[in-house]
Amino acid sequence: MTDRVIVGVTGATGQMYAVTALQLLAETDCEVHLILSDAAKINLRQESDYSVGQVTELGDVVHSIDNIGAKPASGSFRNDGMIVTPCSMKTLAEVAHGHSGNLITRSADVALKERRPLVLMPRETPFNRIHLENMLSVTDAGAIVVPPFPAFYQNPDSIEAMVANTMSRALTHLGVDVDFEEWQGLGT
């Protein structure tokens, strides 16, 4: 393993998921390559108390979304995979249809062609048929679709705890070793 991951952040609602993922990754030895869309920067200011600068400080290397010549755009850039959180329906559609017009979608395309883990966390509700078909298309291509639905069975005491659990579980798909409370089963 290279202990290197790519984090794409798009403009869908749920910027807390991206911030939490970056905070969890900061506690590991992973080198984080961060790509923020322009819409993510706008929505980050709308939904959180974090500035764009504070978020970019959580990445080890920050790439411009317009730089399709950056390292993550190449299959020769060794990494353990990519997560897009939150993943807008526009980004999901572009990945599903092989449209690589920016660094997030190009990096996702590279993850698929190189057979590296690609975790997409679409954040929209309700899903329409096109959304579902796009999720099926990326799943058939090898991506892992993880809508950030909160889990309640462990009785989390806050929204932050639910988000952290969701993101910890999503990051395990990239082989990232993060702590989270595993299901212990029902006592008999």
Image (cartoon, grey):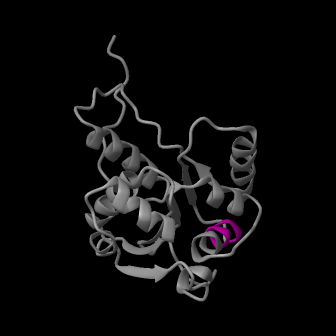
Quarter holding residue 182: top left
> What is the magenta segment's predominant secondary structure?
helix
Side (left or right) of 21 relative to 155: right
The foreground one among 131 and 80 is: 131
Q: Position of residue 28 (x, y in %)?
A: 29, 65
Q: Is residue 138 left or right of residue 57?
A: right
Question: Does 155 appear above or below 11?
Answer: above
Left or right of 64 on screen, residue 142: right
Above or below, 73 relative to 22: below
Residue 37 visible in the picture: no
Q: Position of residue 26 (x, y in %)?
A: 28, 67
In this rendering, position of residue 130 left or right of residue 15: right
Residue at (27, 63) in percent of width and height = 50
Q: Is residue 48 magenta?
A: no
Residue at 34 percent across and 63 percent down: it is 22
Which span is picked out in magenta? 108-113
